[in-house]
Image: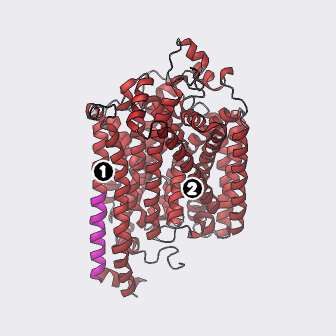
Amino acid sequence: MKENAQRILANPKFQELVQKRSAFAWTLSIAMLVIYFGFILLVAFGKGFLGTPIGSGVTTWGIPVGLFTIISAFILTGIYVHRANGEFDELNRQIMEESK
Amino acid sequence: MRSLVNRVGVAAVAAGALIPASVHAAAVEGPVQKQATNFEAIVMFLVFVLATLGITYWAARRTKSAKDFYAAGGGITGFQNGLAIAGDYMSAASFLGIAGLVYTSGFDGLIFSVGWLVGWPIILFLVAERLRNLGKYTFADVASYRFQQTPMRTMAACGSLATVTFYLIAQMVGAGKLIQLLFGMDYLWAVVIVGVLMIAYVTFGGMLATTWVQIIKAVLLLSGASFMAFAVLAKFGFSPEAMFSTAVQVHPKATGIMAPGALITDPVSAISLGMALMFGTAGLPHILMRFFTVSDAKEARKSVFYATGFIGYFYILTFIIGFGAIVLLLAPDATGAYPFLDAAKLAAAGGKPNPSMIIGGSNMAAIHTAHAVGGDLFFGFISAVAFATILAVVAGLTLAGASAVSHDLYASVIAKGRASEHDEIRVSKITTVVIGIVSIFLGIAFENQNVAFMVGLAFVIAASANFPVLLMSMFWSRMTTRGAVLGGWIGLVSSVSLLIMGPTVWKSVLGNPAALFPYDNPGVFTIPLSFLAIWFFSITDNSKAAQDEREAYKAQYIRSQTGLGAEGASAH
C-alpha cells in the first residue's frame, strides 16, 4: 500500500488527473455560486427587476430567472458527471493499473 | 428575516409559535376544523404502512453485518441512491411547506426551492467522491481520518446529534399535525404512532429498509405531484401565463405574488439565508451517510446527478401546485361556494376570500389542491404519501443519529475500537429506541413550534459546525486536530447560541421584550467564524502530533483522489 502510494504520487498521470479534476470542479463550483448568489442579490437589491412583467402579460422576469437557477444546477451536475465518469475515471483506472 | 420566519411558519404548520394561541386553537382544534373521518385516506395509509413493514421484514432477514445495517451493504446503485437521497430531501417542509408558502406569498416560495437545491452541485463537485473514497459509515469517519479519534469524533457526533435533533423535532411536529388534521386523531397519538413506526423500521431493517422506504416514497411523491401539476396546468390549456393571470385576479396580493415580497427584508438576511441553505445541505449527517451505500465514487456521482434532477423537478412541481392552490382554493366553485375555506372566517370578512382562511392552515394547501383536482381517492393517496414522506425522513434521520452514537461515540471513543460489530449494532438499536422515545416527547413538547424554522436551525447548525470541518479536512493539508476540534465546537456553540438569542426564540418563544441578536439566521457570521477558527488554531499549533497529521495528508489525499484502499472498493 505504501509503495503503491509512492508510485501513484510519482506518476505524471496522477498529477494530470488531480490538476484537471480540481480545476474543473472549482470552475463549476464558482459558476454555481455566481448564479445562485446572483439570484440572491437580485432578491436583496433588485426586487424591481424581478417583479417587472415580461411583455404585456403578468409573468414576471423573476419566474424565468428562478427556473434558470434550478435548471442550471441540474445541467452543471450533468456536465461534471459526464466528464468525471468518462475521462477522469479512465485516467484513474490507468493510474491504479500502473501502480500495481 | 423576522417576517421570513413568520411566513415560513405559517406556510409549514397550521400554527406556529408566532401566531397567537387563540388563532392557533381555532385553526387546529376548533369545532369548524374537525374533519370527517376520511376512509380513503385511512385505507391508503394502512396499505402503505403494511407494505413498508413488509419491506422491513425482508430487509431484516438480509441485514447481518454492520455494513448491512449502516450502509445497506454498499450495494445500492447510483440511480436507486439518487431516488433515496431525493426521498430524504423531499421532507414535509419541502412539499407541504413550499406549496403553502407559494400559496400565501407566491414568488417567495421559489427562493426557498432554489436555495435548497443549489447545495447539491457543490456537494458533487467538492465533497461526494472524496467522501465515498475516505468514509465507512458516518461523515465523522472522513472528518477524523488523519486526526486524533476521541476529540474529533466526540465533536462530530455532537454536531450530528444537534442537527438531527432539530430536524427530527420539525418532522415529528409536522407529522403529528398532519395526522391530527387528516384522520381526526389526537395529536398525542399521532406523534406516538410516528415514533413507534420509525423505531420499527430502523431497528429491524437498518439502512436497507430505510433506503427502500425512501425509494418507494420518492416514486409515489413524484408521481402524485406530477399528476397534480399536470391537472392544474391542464385547466389552463397548459399556459402558465393563463394560470398566473387568474392567480393574480383571485389573490388579495394581486401582482405582488409575482415578485419577491416581504420574505426577505434586508440584504444581510438574504445572504445569510442563502449561505445556510446552500452549505447546510453539505453538512446534514443523514444526507452524507447516503454516499456510503453505493459501491464507488462513480455511483456516488451518479446519485447526486439523479437526486439533483428529481429534487429540481419536484420543486418546479410544488411551485405549480402552490399556484394551483391559489386558483382552485381562492376562487368560488360552480355553486359559488368556497369549499376549502373556513366558512366562519369567510363570513366574518364579508365573503372576501383570503389565503389565511384555508381549513387546517396553509400547510394543507397542497392536500386541498389534491382534493380539488383528483377527488376523494386522490386526496387519500396524497395524504398517505405526505405521511409516508415524513415517516421515511424521520427513519433516515434516526439512523444517522444512532450511527453517530454507536459508531462514533461508542465504538471509537468509549470502546476505543475494541467493540465487536455485534455490540456496535446492538448499541445502535438501543440508541434508535432512545431517540424514538425522546423525539416522541420532544414532538409533544414542541407541539406549537414552527416546523420550517426548526428545519432552518438544522441547516444553520449543519453549515456552521459540520460543513467547515468536513471541507477543510479534505482540502487543507495543514489542518490539525486542535484547529478542527476548536473550529467545530465554535461553529456549533456560536450557531446554537445566536439562534437562541435571535428574534424568534428570544423574543417570540421566550417572551423577552427585545432580541439580543438582530438576525434570525446567523449563518453569515457563524460559517466564516468556524472557518477562521479552524485556520487560526491550526496554524498556531506546533505540536509533534500536529506535524504528523500534516504529514498524513499525503496518504489521505491519494486515497481521496483515486479510491486506493477505499472501503468496499475491492468487494465489487
Identify the chain of the residue marked 2, using the numbered disc in the image: B
Q: Which of B482 and B45 lies nearest the eye of the viewer?
A: B45
Q: Closer to the camera: disc 1 or disc 2?
A: 1
Q: Give how far across and how far down residue A54 sits, in percent.
A: 28, 35
Q: Is residue B417 left or right of residue B317?
A: right
In the rendered image, the vertical position of residue B157 relative to residue B523, given as above or below: below
Q: State the residue at coordinates (49%, 65%).
A: B78
Where does label 1 land, which residue? A33
Q: Give how far across and how far down residue B415 sits, in percent.
A: 61, 65
Where does label 2 land, which residue? B400
Q: Amino acid at mark 1?
A: Leu
In the rendered image, the vertical position of residue B282 relative to residue B277, given as above or below: below
Q: Is residue B526 visible?
A: yes
* Residue interval drawn in magenta: A11-28
Separation of disc 1 and disc 2 at Cα? 28 Å
Q: State the residue at coordinates (63%, 38%).
A: B443
Q: Amino acid at mark 2?
A: Ala
**Hey, which quadrant is residue B137 in on the image?**
bottom right
Q: How is the image coloured?
A: secondary structure
Q: Which of B425 and B316 lies nearest the eye of the viewer?
A: B316
Q: State the residue at coordinates (36%, 73%).
A: A86
